[in-house]
Image: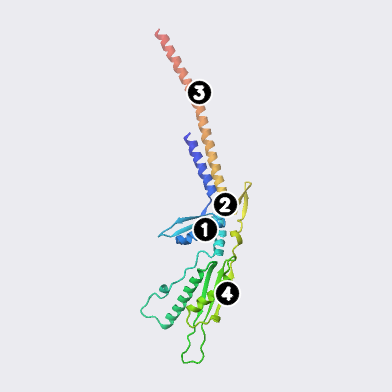
Amino acid sequence: MKRNRIATILCVLALCMALTGCKVALYSNLTEQEANDMMAALLTAGIDTEKVAGEEGKWVLNVDEARFAAAVERLGAAGLPRDDFASMGEVFKKEGLISSPLEERVRFIYALSQELAKTISEIDGVISARVHVVIPENNPFSDTITPSSAAVFVKHRQDSEVDAFIPQIKRLVVDSIEGLAYDKVTVVLVPSQELVGGQVAAPQMASALGLRLEAGSVGPFWAIVGALAGLALLGCGVAAWLFVRGRKAGPGASGGASGKSSGNAAGEGGNA
């Protein structure tokens, strides 16, 4: 009875493994906000996702192995995870005793580009943004002055109306860079290839024992079928062994009891 109960529990566990599938880590070392944004995008697309706590307050995002490629494609179209932008304090962090004027200039231009890109990324519908600033080092004694310029690249969702914000984006850049003219700012808008309605490409399917399964689940499926078959054979072997043992024990016990009764009867007759 106990052996049958153990076999039943093992079968249930194997079936649970078949239903849950094999999950792999999609991204790690995420903040909770990043993990929540990515998880929401994947769940909206119908991709099962789980968030697991990692080390030092970070989070890990897991998905089914069969949907890994679809998850990466979906997050890439949504611009997730977001780019990390360096702040002014991070760029101008002192790491040496003396910085050359050229180093300070390059750091300033880079920090300015990062701050502008971060601000533009906050606009609704923007997936990612890049700002390239050119500030020539003009000679104050020269009659020829090269004007400053800037180029803004914006990747946005197809259903957004970011093009209506082009004048505001140009004005933002102009007012942030000293000596920059409005006509020297170029804004390039590129729509993403995100599928409308949050749909993703259907996973590749395969057939096993007449069942339609995702291609990545065929291997685990056969492994579980083999385990169940082994458990079934083990259960049949145990049942057969118990059956044979019971049949052998039955007649022997009965014969021994009959012989003991006859011996007792004979002893009583002799005493009489």
Tell me the distance, in whole angstroms, between the alpha carbons under discs 1 and 4.
29 Å
Q: Which mark is residue 78?
A: none
Local packing at callout 3 (Cα closer than 10 Å; few below 14, some 14-19, many 20+) is: few
Local packing at callout 4 (Cα closer than 10 Å; few below 14, some 14-19, many 20+) is: few
Residue most extreme to the top: 272
Quick check: marks 1 and 4 in contact, CB under 8 Å? no
Q: Which mark is residue 251?
A: 3
Is label 2 or label 1 in front?
1
Which residue in the protein does label 1 denote?
Answer: 40
Q: Along the polypeptide, which appears first: circle 2 or circle 3? A: 2
Q: Along the polypeptide, which appears first: circle 2 or circle 4? A: 4
Quick check: marks 1 and 3 in contact, CB under 8 Å? no
Tell me the distance, in whole angstroms, between the alpha carbons under discs 2 and 1.
24 Å
Where in the figure is residue 142, as x and y percent of width and height? 49, 92
Is label 1 or label 3 in front?
1
Local packing at callout 1 (Cα closer than 10 Å; few below 14, some 14-19, many 20+) is: some
Q: Quick one: SS at disc 1? A: helix
Tell me the distance, in whole angstroms, between the alpha carbons under discs 3 and 4.
94 Å
Badge 4 amino acid: Val
Which residue in the protein does label 2 denote?
Answer: 217
Q: Along the polypeptide, which appears first: circle 2 or circle 1? A: 1
Badge 1 amino acid: Ala
Q: Residue at x 50, y 27 (%)?
A: 248
Q: Quick one: SS at disc 3? A: helix
Q: Along the polypeptide, which appears first: circle 3 or circle 4? A: 4
Q: Along the polypeptide, which appears first: circle 1 or circle 4? A: 1
Q: Quick one: SS at disc 4? A: strand
Quick check: marks 2 and 4 in contact, CB under 8 Å? no
Where in the figure is residue 138, as x and y percent of width and height? 48, 87
Tell me the distance, in whole angstroms, between the alpha carbons under discs 2 and 4.
43 Å
Which residue in the protein does label 4 denote?
Answer: 188
